[in-house]
Amino acid sequence: MRPVLTPKQMHVLDTETITAGTPIEILVGRAGAAVARAAKRMMGGLYGRTVVVITGKGNNGADGRVTARLLADQGVRVHVINAENMPLRLPVSDLIIDAAFGTGFRDDWSPPSTQGVPVLAVDIPSGIDGLTGLAAPDTWQATRTVTFVALKPGLLLGAGRALCGEVELVDIGINLGMGNVDINEVERSDVSQWVPQRPFDSHKWKAALYAVAGSSGMMGAANLCSAAAIRSGAGIVHVASPGIVSDRSTPTEIVRRALPALGWSHEVLDDLSRFKAIVIGPGLGRDEGTVSEARRVIAGAHIPMVIDGDGLFAVAWGGEGARDIVRSRAAGTVLTPHDGEYTTLLGYAPSHDRITSARRLASDTNCVCLLKGTTTIVAEPSGEVLMVANGDQRLATAGTGDVLAGIIGALLAQGVEPFHAAASGAWIHGYAASLFTANEGLIASDLVDLIPLALSHMRHVGSQD
């Protein structure tokens, strides 16, 4: 995992380090040297090169001034420009180093055009909010960002993720301490540790998954969820859809369970004794009878559960105290809302500070919350957060959320604890999309077919770490 610190946390850590005896000049010197090394790599050398360094107030500007001096000492022609007195046109150069504002950005930022010159950002591109990733309209697109000690949320969220370019995390001698980091970005090696390999003596019921999903006209959701689950390691998957006796589109490997259209919750609960986990909600429907029965299953099932799609509507349905059914569950529970479902659950939309929003839902429901977005935020009730930033815009298509629910359900059935199952599921989901060979045209069923390859790649890299 890569640590993530909010601007406030980073400020506290800086202060503690200086108070403990490390002079600020030492820290700035290390940071400036790291940026100078990155500049040399980006330009392929220093001979005959010209660099523009934009500096502002505070430590970020100080880092830039150290970088400028180090480059000048090595023969680079350097133009140092104060961010508060920017010209209408920058001098011709081979590289622009943006050391204007950093994570403390609060002002307007309307810099001149870069004219296509590569930009190396110091800590975070100027104009990006270090907490939310929101960006000022004219924020430069960085080719590379050198950040220090830990990632900042703004590098992973919103426009910040797209504008920061390649991110290099540099150690400048600040100790993160024990237990001080409560936000981390998930990496491939983490997933390989969390997701178990199937034991040699396993059998299908050791990782059995039950799914309550699908309804008339919405069987695709049930089929995508169940197919993703069986591809992700579930030993056997049973799918029950209220009012659906059979469905020809059900994958061959999936067991179809018939349920009546009404009064079906007791049949589901009676079936669960051999199953290790349950998914409820994809394509289930929102009529009053279905919602009431879904709530009974959610309250009465004593195995780990993923609540997705219409299952989230059922959790929210019923007014004051409706969410008590998940707060009181004894087994682990993962909620997987997008922004609209989050709003349905809590009565208001997620804020720009998506980490705080995910934490709020996790705390309010006593569940693991997976808040979907360009970067997925996974929060547990304790406040610990995992960020998954390997997905892209190709996942913005119908059915991919059903696939994600199936992946997470399969991981729960294999015994992965809910917090890691949610984060691992999101990572596998995003990585599978990255294996699609075209930039456009990905559909949810493509994602299902790519899951085994994603798992294989994950295992291979994990074995090398």
Image: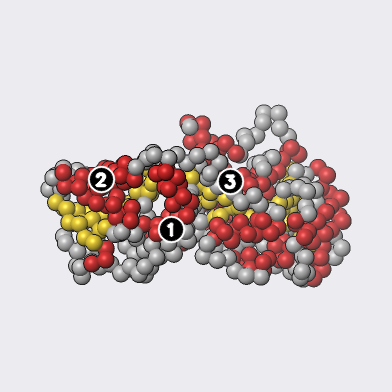
Q: Residues within 10 Å of mark 3 (few under 14, many from 20)?
A: many
Alpha carbons under labels 3 and 1: distance apart: 25 Å
* SS category of the residue bearing label 1: loop
**Which residue matches tag 1?**
130
Total numbered labels placed on residues in the image: 3
Image disc number at residue 424: 3
Kindly identify the amino acid type of the residue bearing the numbered disc 1: Gly
Vertical side of 317 occupied by 226: above or below: above
Disc 3 secondary structure class: helix
What is the x, y in percent for residue 461? 48, 36
Who is closer to the viewer here, 177 or 132? 177
The numbered mark, 2 or 1, whose residue comes first in the sequence reads 2
* Alpha carbon distance from label 2 to label 1: 22 Å
Q: Position of residue 202 (x, y in %)?
A: 71, 32
Determine whether 91 is above or below 15 in the image: below
> Which amino acid, by three-letter code, is at mark 3?
Ser
* Marks 2 and 3, the one that precedes in the sequence: 2
Of marks 2 and 3, the one in the foreground: 2
Write down the quadrant of residue 439 in the picture.
Answer: bottom left
**Relative to residue 31, is residue 289 depicted above or below?**
below
Could you classify mark 2 by the number of other residues whose Cα lies within 10 Å: few (under 14), some (14-19), or many (20 or more)? many
Amino acid type, callout 2? Ala
In the picture, the disc for residue 98 is none
Q: Tell which circle, 3 or 1, labels the residue nearer the N-terminal end.
A: 1
- Report x, y in % for residue 428: 55, 47
Q: Give the residue drawn at x 87%, y 63%.
A: 263
Location of mark 2 (residue): 36
Which one is nearer the viewer's eye here, 263 or 374? 374
Inter-mark Cα distance, 2 to 3: 36 Å
